[in-house]
Amino acid sequence: MSKSKTRKQIFGKLQTAGIEDPSSVEQKGSKKVDMNRVIDERSGTYTDTPPIWDNGMYTKCKIGDEEHIFLVDNGSSATLMSKSAYIKIKEEKRPILERTENKLKGANGQDIKVNGKVQLKLCFDKTNNAHKTAIICDIDPDGTLRQDFLLTHATSIDYKRPTVNTKNFQIRCWIGGEAECRVTSREKMIIPAMTKASVKVSIENVENLSETGLLIADAHFENNTNLRVVEGVLDPHKDTVNVILINASENPVHGHENVTVGKCESYFEQKEPDEILCNHIHEADNDNTLPEHLKDLLERSSTELDLTNVDT
């Protein structure tokens, strides 16, 4: 099968829905734009490489089996998803693209191409997810969570931590431009079968972390070694930091030095509020007499009793 036929088969359905072959997009005057270039939504201009992330707040979420990075932006109304991120979703799990009359403009006033809208299921961890309508268009990064999402799901935004708090869970975020804090092994590893071992690790860019860190396992490491990383909180600023690796297989596992076993994020304990709000406080007096609304119940429930029925 030729390359052109393969491409036609893959994108045939998307073309009928308004999405073109991502290798090129027709513009006015039949001028083709290389889709390796992306449009910077904030400036509205095409760039050869994605813009360097500024101090915006970002979070990771899964749609289908694909992990995406979304900008948390409460300065605009509609939640967006890039066309390139949409196409990466496996076809059997890809949301149906619907037509929309929405129009978008960049910061420079130029139109941003809109391909349609979809209903997204955004998974922020294994148990917590949220549903939202998103507009598919030519932007970078993968998407933006905007006012419509935040007004529906968010109860507060903590820019210091940073997190988006919802009624049922927290969406952990990071500030753009902050280096990722990888956790790597400092020594060669030999972990016998059916055992666990404590391994010395190094944490990159530890100066960006809070006093307490949250260790998150690297899925690639676990899949390729059959080891499991014990996730949890730790002190990233200690002179020696150790993590626990579990070998549940029947064979010993050997590992090399400087292997990425996970990453570390700042962790903040969620403290109880100093004040608890309530609608009404009833102050009881010291009167031991039976309340008026219980007197009738007492009389009706004790009419058949005599001294032989009373517990002493």
Image (cartoon, helix red, strand yellow):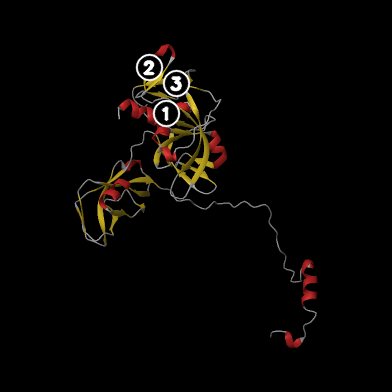
Residue 37, compared with residue 293, is above or below; it is above
Measured in 3D between alpha carbons, the distance from the residue under mark 1 to the one under mark 2, in whole angstroms, is 19 Å
Tag in front: 2 or 3: 2
- For label 1, the residue is 12
Viewer-side residue, 96 vs 207? 96
Q: Where is residue 277 in the image (x, y as percent from the top left)?
A: 62, 51
Marking on residue 265: none
Q: Where is residue 260 in the image (x, y as percent from the top left)?
A: 27, 45
If the image is split into quadrants, where does the C terminus sit? bottom right
Marking on residue 44: 3
Marking on residue 32: 2
Q: Where is residue 290 in the image (x, y as percent from the top left)?
A: 76, 71
Measured in 3D between alpha carbons, the distance from the residue under mark 3 to the one under mark 1, in whole angstroms, is 28 Å
Residue 260, compared with residue 99, is above or below; it is below
Residue at image coords 34%, 29%? 6
Q: Which amino acid does label 2 sit on?
A: Lys
